[in-house]
Amino acid sequence: MIAQYSIGPSAVLLTGSTGHLGCHLLTNLIKNSAVHRIYAFNRPKNSPVQERHQERFRAAGLDLDHLKSSKLRFVEGDLSARNLGLSDELYNEVCSSQL
């Protein structure tokens, strides 16, 4: 049923992808051929977002190679800030994606 409403490849803005549930959602999105871009949106912390994803994937027993996917883009920002705390360029890219 969902397929009849699909208009082509889509993009996803996923928040909390370093969390327990979020890392599993991220893995499934990476494997999904209908998804062409994933913005893994997380709050800034002391360690780089890629490192936090690697730690979470290791702890969950997930394939670290998924984090090398060309459709995955790591994003740090603030949901309460103007333009989600993103640069104008990145914000416009996210807005123009088929979310």
Image (cartoon, helix red, strand yellow):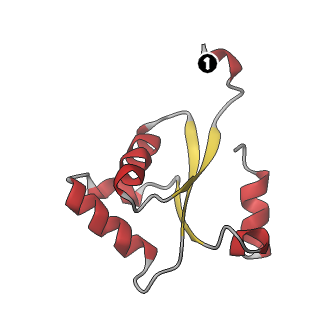
Label 1: few (<14), some (14–19) or many (≥20) C-alpha neighbours in 10 Å: few
The front one of 10 and 52 is 52
Q: Is residue 68 left or right of residue 84?
A: left
Q: Which residue is mark 1?
A: 3
Which residue of the protein is positioned furthest toward the bottom in this rendering? 46
Relative to 67, does residue 29 appear above or below in the rendering?
above
Residue 86 seen in render: no
Q: Indicate left or right for 84 with 1 as reference.
A: right
- Residue 57: image quadrant is bottom left
Above or below residue 98? Residue 67 is: below
The quadrant in which the N terminus is found is top right
Give the quarter of the image for residue 83.
Answer: bottom right
Q: Is residue 15 left or right of residue 24?
A: right
Q: Nearer the viewer, residue 64 or 70?
A: 64
* Helix, strand or loop for disc 1: helix
Q: Can the viewer see residue 73 in this picture?
A: yes
The front one of 37 and 75 is 75
Amino acid type at circle 1 is Ala
| Residue 33 spot, x, y in % from top left | 50, 34
Give the residue at x 73% y 49%: 97
When asked about the image quadrant of residue 94, the answer is: bottom right
For the C terminus, the image quarter is top right
Q: Is residue 46 left or right of residue 71?
A: left
